[in-house]
Image (tube, rainbow, N blue to C red):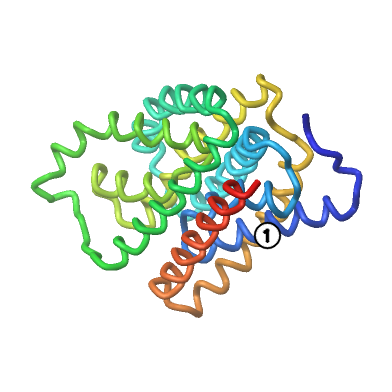
Amino acid sequence: MPIEILDPIIIFLSIISGVIVGFSLGLIGGGGSVLAVPLLLYVVGVKDTHLAIGTSALAVGIIAGINILNHKKLGNVKIRKGLFFAIPGIAGTLLGAQLGLWTPSGNLLILFAGFMAIVGFLILKKNASKHEVTSGSSNLVLLKKNVSLSGFSVGVLAGYFGIGGGFLVVPTIMYSGGLNIIQAVGTSLVSVSSFGLTTAARYFVAGQADLIIAALLIIGGVMGGYFGLKTSEKIPKENLSKVFAVVLFAVAAYIVIRTATA
C-alpha cells in the first residue's frame, strides 16, 4: 500500500528526491532515473521495492513525455525512428514488469544493485571509447535489422527495474538510425516515456504505484532538470559522468550492505 503522504517531511523528501533525479538527468543526459528507486526506498521511506519501482516508472515516463515536447520544438525528435524502437520495446516492457512483480522484493533489490553497478561500468566505458557513428557506417544495415531485438531487450530491463533506459536507448538509436547524439537523445525519449508509462500501468493494476508521490517526484524532477542542464553547460560532461558512475557504485554497495544486514 502507498505510504502516508500527508506528513510535510515526506512531501519535502519526495520533491527533493525528484530534484536529485532531474538534476542528474539534466547534468549528464541519462542514467539519472536509476537513482529514483533507492531514493524512494531510503530517503522518502517507501517500504516495498515493488511500490518504489512502480512509482519511479510513472514519474520517469511522464517527465520523459514532457521533455519530448521541448526537444521536438528544436527538431531533435524523429518520431518514426523512435516508434520503430519503442513498439517492440513495449512488448519487452510488459514482460519485464511482470517478471519484476513475480520476483521477491529482497531478491529484486539485490539484482537492482547489480544493475546499478553495470550502469556505472557502461558509463565509464562510454567515456573511455568515444567514436562517431554516421549513416554511412558499414555496420548500419546490420544494426537496423537488430533494432527490434534491441528495443525488446531494453524494454525488458526497463520494465523489470522501473527505469527509462535512456542510457541504453540513446547509443542504439544513434547507431541504427544514423542520428547525431542530440537527435538520438531527443528521439530516445519516445521509448523512455513509453517504457516508463507501460511499466507504471502494469504496476498500478497490481496496486504498486503511488500517484501522489510520483507527482511530487515529477515536480522536483522538472526543477532539477532545469538546473542540471544549466550546470552541464559549465562543467565537462566526461568528468561529470565519472563522478556519477562512482555515485552509482557507492549506492549499489549501500543497497547490498543494507539488505544483507536487514
Q: Position of residue 102 (x, y in %)?
A: 54, 22
Which residue, given by chain and number where applicable, does mark 1 sit on? 19
Give the amino acid at mark 1.
Val
Residue at the image position 48 percent from the left and 78 percent from the top: 235
Mark 1: few, some, or many residues within 10 Å (few <14, many ≥20)? many
Residue at the image position 35 percent from the left and 29 percent from the top: 152
**Would residue 174 appear left or right of 23 to someone viewing this image?**
left
- Can I make out residue 201 in this image? yes
Residue, far front: 261
Mark 1: secondary structure: helix
Residue, far bottom: 234
Viewer-proximal residue, 226 or 209?
A: 209
Viewer-proximal residue, 204 or 183?
A: 204
Q: Position of residue 120 (x, y in %)?
A: 41, 58
Residue at the image position 75 percent from the left and 50 percent from the top: 44
Q: Quadrant of residue 204?
A: top right
Residue, far left: 138
Q: Position of residue 11 (x, y in %)?
A: 83, 51
Q: Is residue 183 above or below residue 236?
A: above
